[in-house]
Amino acid sequence: MSTVVRFAPSPTGYIHLGNARPALMNWMFALKTGGQFILRFDDTDLERSKKEYADAIEKDLAWLGIKPHRLERQSERKAAHDAARDKLIADGRLYPCYETADELDRRRKRARAMGRPPIYDRAALKLTDEEKAALEAEGRKPHWRFKLEGKEVHFDDVVRGDQVVNTDTMSDPVLIRADGSYLYTLPSVVDDIDMGVTHVIRGEDHVTNTGAQIELFEALGATPPTFGHHNLLTDATGEGFSKRKGSLSITNLREEGYEALAVALIAILTGTSQPVAPHESLDELAQSFDISMVSRSAARFDPAELDGFNARMVHGLSYDDVKDRLAELGVDDAEQLWNAVHENLQKVHDIRDWQKLVSGPVETVVADEDKDFIATAAERLPQEPWDENTWSEWTNDLKAETGRKGKQLFMPLRLALTGQSHGPELKTLLPLLGRTACLDRLS
Ligand code: GLU
């Protein structure tokens, strides 16, 4: 059987690292099984859904390395949703309710006070046609609930194993708002059926929904797909990443120059039995990755890890890997520079700082009390050829000659050569600068 999965974001904001996880889990699954990946915008909330966000999500996914085979928008599928609605009404599984939010709230409070679970009491099912007509004459518009069977719904979750959701303990879910618009549940199930989705892989915050959705699949005459609920990515304190966590939005991470693959690997591997370690590509990871490797406990992630991991990935990149990106950064013909410095970079674009230092001009800084020392340093600059050892040969010689050591020895040289009190390792920088440029900066 060929597999079909979907990632179904609501385009009501930018996606962040936590939302990238289900997208990537589905992508891994599609790669591994040779299946299809659908990007489906759950955009039935017309007021909050924005094209700008949908476009950004597409761009973010492409950057992460996800290439959807199909793009769908729920807003274009209203006729199919309406047909399902009509079938459910005809079958007596979808019924109109007239309670206001305040009334429902009061009832829930009362139930709690009496020690009963705050479940919708299905009062609307008892309304006669006359009563309904009277409510509508008052100007009330119904919202519509799906009548659950109230049973133990069993499913075999590809991540969590055997699951049971007892729909008897749940309120009948509202599928249609009083303004006629659909909440997420019905369009999602209808589209999963029509699009031939075989595996619904999503966050574990949906486990309970799955119970009701399986009943809905059945009510619509369909066999439910296989489900898999992965743990959620949280920050170090266990808090989820809300859409407001702008700093961890994928757009922001891209703009800050993180490696797409580093971000993707963190989003996938955190909270699994595989270590967060570099991989060649998502394709390569997919071969060894199995969705059942996802752990049952929270996937805790400390944003600081991303910096370290990104640097690790950058250190493993060859010049060929980055040549085109360097050209985009305006750093052309930089093989020697890349080879010399890439193990010192946190992000690829940091190479611009090195290039600036190497090509100059730099405003060198020599304090009065260091003038003689710098003159001696210029005199005693070794002859070329230079390599990584030149720096220690030179500074050992200067130490013996002048008696200076530690910061007193190194800092004036750094300031004279780079104009800055910190920066790249001088033993790497020196051979890139060459003798002529060094002499120039020291004089
Ligand atoms: N639009 C839903 C969400 O973002 C999709 C959930 C699902 O995958 O079914 O939570």
Image (tube, helix red, strand yellow):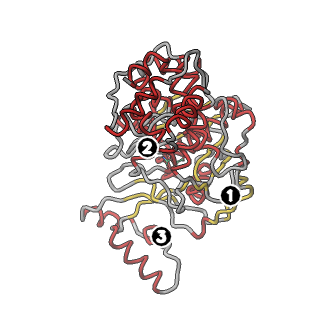
What residue sits 67% from the left and 33% below the top?
279
What residue sits 70% from the left and 55% below the top?
160
Q: Position of residue 423 (x, y in %)?
A: 45, 36
Which residue position holds label 3?
122
Q: Secondary structure at mark 1?
A: loop
Does residue 6 appear anywhere in the picture?
A: no
Q: Closest to the observer: 66 or 75?
A: 66
Would you call the spot at circle 3 few (<14 residues within 10 Å), some (14-19), or many (20 or more)?
some
Which residue position holds label 1?
296
Amino acid at pointer 3: Arg
Q: Is mark 2 within 8 Å of ligand 1?
A: no
Which residue position holds label 2?
249
Q: Position of residue 224 (x, y in %)?
A: 65, 47
Q: Is residue 428 placed above or below 111 in the rendered structure? A: above
Does residue 256 appear anywhere in the picture?
A: yes
What residue sits 52% from the left and 48% below the top?
18
270 left or right of 87 in image: right
For the residues carrying marks 2 and 3, which lies nearer the camera in this image?
2
Would you call the spot at circle 2 few (<14 residues within 10 Å), some (14-19), or many (20 or more)?
many
Q: Which numbered disc, 2 or 3, marks the residue that appears first in the sequence?
A: 3
Amino acid at pointer 1: Arg
Question: Which residue is outermost to the top?
Answer: 333
Q: Position of residue 334 (x, y in %)?
A: 50, 16
Q: Which numbered disc, 3 or 1, marks the residue that appears first in the sequence?
A: 3
- Mark 3 and mark 1: span between their CA atoms? 35 Å
Whether residues under marks 2 and 3 lie with C-beta atoms below 8 angstroms apart, the answer is no
- Mark 2 and mark 3: span between their CA atoms? 41 Å
Q: Secondary structure at mark 3?
A: loop
Q: Position of residue 419 (x, y in %)?
A: 36, 32
Q: Secondary structure at mark 2?
A: loop
